[in-house]
Image (cartoon, rainbow, N blue to C red):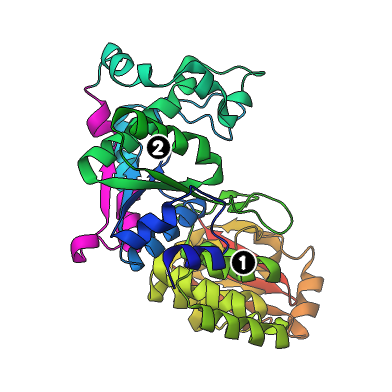
Amino acid sequence: MKFIEELKWRGMIHDIMPGTDEQLEKEMTTAYVGFDPTADSLHIGHLVSIMILKHFQVAGHKPIALIGGATGMVGDPSGKSEERSLLDEKTLRQNQEGMKKQMQKLLDFDCGENSALLVNNYDWMKDFSFLGFLREVGKHLTVNYMMAKDSVKKRLETGISFTEFSYQLVQGYDFLFLNKNFNCKLQMGGSDQWGNITTGTELIRRMTGGEAYALTCPLITKSDGKKFGKTESGNIWLDPKKSSPYKFFQFWINCSDEDAVKYIKIFTLISREEIEELEKQHYEAPHLRIIQKALAKDITIKVHSEEDYNAAVEASTILFGKGTTETLRNLSEDMLLSVFEGVPQVEISINEIKTGIGIIEMLTEKTNIFATKGEARRMLKDNGVSINKEKVKDTFVVTEKDLLNEKYILAQKGKKNYYLIKTV
């Protein structure tokens, strides 16, 4: 399938400039997508743009990922209701390095002629003087043209600084620079970037008379209308330190059926035939969550690793009663805390554990998991208490050998009430 046909089938095209398809048919084309380095990690919202670059590369074209070291210092007004805070150069460089490592897992930077490139616009903007930029770039576009952009019009009532107003000129110059130096003829991005991208095509047309094209993808939302990628606790990041592989996996496995059918087309390279077969199986037995499982597996392995995926699958069984003590012991501390995020945590002295402590005393006097010893005894007698997923009796003594990651004990009261006991 051709690149444009592929994206259309996957629901990944919002706007496309006339002539783009013909340009891609004519020759191997270079295209870029820009990423603002506002954090030291990409989040799953960035994956849409990365997947467009990936499809572009798979179709035989050359992708450029542009880290906006310069534009990140200015701030893009698109989709923003207020001015964003500006970052210093040191922070931007740190953010760039973090994003670079993640992109290297998702794009092929060593595959010959169409190897991906990573560039930073700070490298060509840093020596530009203010007067030089006004003379070389600013004179080519009218204020009327710039004010007609939606990203500017929406901010005129609340106010927009000259800094953010000029953002489209800086992004437009990026396209011009890449066009001159890398023969880049296409810029891609989210639908909110259409105005900035077409400023670039206009600059290229006016300053060099060259060819330039634009393509945008829809901004992804969830079926309930909420912003994609955001949870109650914030963004889902690609950095395992910011969002554990378990939390990452859970985001995809918990998608609604409607979202999963949409996301598997956008966020994986699974073929049309395979996806249509998965959809068929899914609608025959929706309770098996076949599409969610295929989506979560593909994307967790791609972003993290197969080992992380297997650990996340194993960890997810714990809350549904299928996990074992061995499963718990195999979890890293980060994974354990991710699985039991939101579960009540109580503390107990490590010295109590070292000397050994009776189960009834631990669950009542030391942690208040049970209000009374009588209640604890009754539940223990009825096999209603588990330590680290194993049923225990009222004679059980908790010792150091029961610690998970040398620090935690998982207590379970009944089927659904978990408590994470942390030693201090």
The question of residue 335 being in magenta is answered with no
Q: Position of residue 404 (x, y in %)?
A: 48, 70
Mark 1 residue element: helix
**Which residue does the image show at 33% across and 49% down from the upper left?**
65
**Which residue does the image show at 79% across and 66% down from the upper left?**
372
Q: As displayed, is residue 291 above or below residue 340? A: below
- Residue 262 is labelled as 1
Asked if residue 336 can be seen in this view, the reply is: no
Count residues near mark 1 (Cα–Cα under 10 Å), then give few for <14, some for 14-19, many for 20+: some
Asked if residue 189 can be seen in this view, the reply is: yes
Residue nearest the viewer, comparing 124 with 113: 113
**Which residue does the image show at 70% across and 78% down from the upper left?**
385
Q: Which residue is mark 2?
A: 201
Amino acid found under the numbered disc labelled 2? Thr
Report the side of 274 relative to 414 (left or right).
Answer: left
Mark 1 to mark 2 CA distance (whole Å): 31 Å
Q: Which residues are magenta?
A: 98-127
Residue nearest the viewer, comparing 201 with 218: 201
Report the side of 238 relative to 157 (left or right).
Answer: left
Mark 2 residue element: helix
The residue mark sitting in front, 1 or 2, is 2
Q: Position of residue 371 (x, y in %)?
A: 79, 62
**Which residue does the image show at 67% across and 73% down from the upper left?**
412
Where residue 363 sits, quadrant-wise, is bottom right
Q: Position of residue 194 (x, y in %)?
A: 51, 40
Report the side of 225 relative to 345 (left or right).
Answer: right
Q: Earlier in the sequence, mark 1 or mark 2?
A: 2
Q: As displayed, is residue 24 above or below residue 250? A: above
- Residue 280 is labelled as none
Image quadrant containing the N terminus: bottom left
Q: As displayed, is residue 98 above or below residue 334? A: above
